[in-house]
Amino acid sequence: MSVGGDAFCAGKGGGRAADGGHGAERFATHALAGSNQLWLARHAKPLIAPGICYGTLDVEAHAELTQMAAQSLAKALPTDITVITSPLRRCMQLAECLQALRPDLTYQTDDRLREMDFGTWEGVPWADIPKEAVDAWTDDFANHRFGGKESANEVLARVASAWDSLQANMSTLWIAHSGVAQAVSLLQQGIRRVERAQDWPAPQLGFGEWLTFSRRA
């Protein structure tokens, strides 16, 4: 497991996107025959100092990098795609920029797509969080609520609820967080519960990047 602000994260997928400011592109895929496609885009780099713990802390994203990500995504997205975003501001910015470029891409919010809530540790430098607190989390990763709010499996369960509600025969874009992408990578493998910290995928989704996943109808 990797920890860090908005780095309760990752998964693999496909797509094309600018990274946290260097315009990098990446391609991959999680494809299943006869499946529906989920696009999952991560917000651009947030305006917060490095080394700060943040999940539901509602920080804004870099405006120029958000615009860059929106421009790349707008060119890649198909028509007739449903857009759903985390209600956190850094994701809403991307949704708003995307809609300005593609007026057909109206969006709605879904609280199930927010990042993990780190509770009392939100906004605290990781270096200032007692080692005992982190150890308590990793030692009982399945059930421990780091910061007192959510366990890893509670995050996985709410993302699973959104995953299960995806409409058949429709493409959907989620604008969300790396933690959501990580949960989706588990769900696509049929994993709905984790027991150990090492069972959680390593971070791979960069700021402003997107992935594509497929799920059976």
Image (cartoon, grey):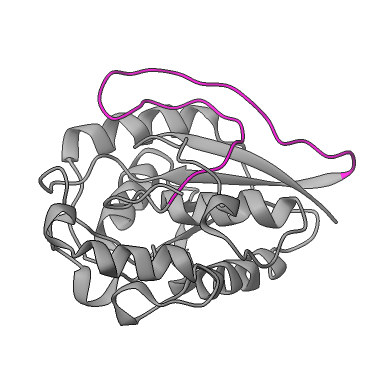
Point out the residue furthest to the right here: 34
Q: Is residue 6 above or below residue 56?
A: above
Q: Is residue 213 above or below residue 72?
A: below
The quadrant where residue 128 appears: bottom left
The one nearer the camera, 159 or 69, is 159
The one nearer the camera, 37 or 4, is 4
Q: Does the segment drawn in magenta span residue 36?
A: no
- Quadrant of the drawing holding the C terminus: bottom right
Residue 135 visible in the snapshot: yes
Q: Is residue 37 left or right of residue 184?
A: right
Rendering coords of residue 57 (x, y %): 22, 66
Rendering coords of residue 105 (x, y %): 48, 49
Q: Residue at x 26, y 76 (%)?
A: 119
Q: Residue at x 43, y 47 (%)?
A: 103
Q: Which residues are magenta?
A: 9-34
Rendering coords of residue 76 (x, y %): 54, 29
Q: Residue at x 45, y 18 (%)?
A: 25
Q: Does the segment drawn in magenta span residue 22?
A: yes
The quadrant where residue 92 appears: bottom left
Rendering coords of residue 102 (x, y %): 43, 41
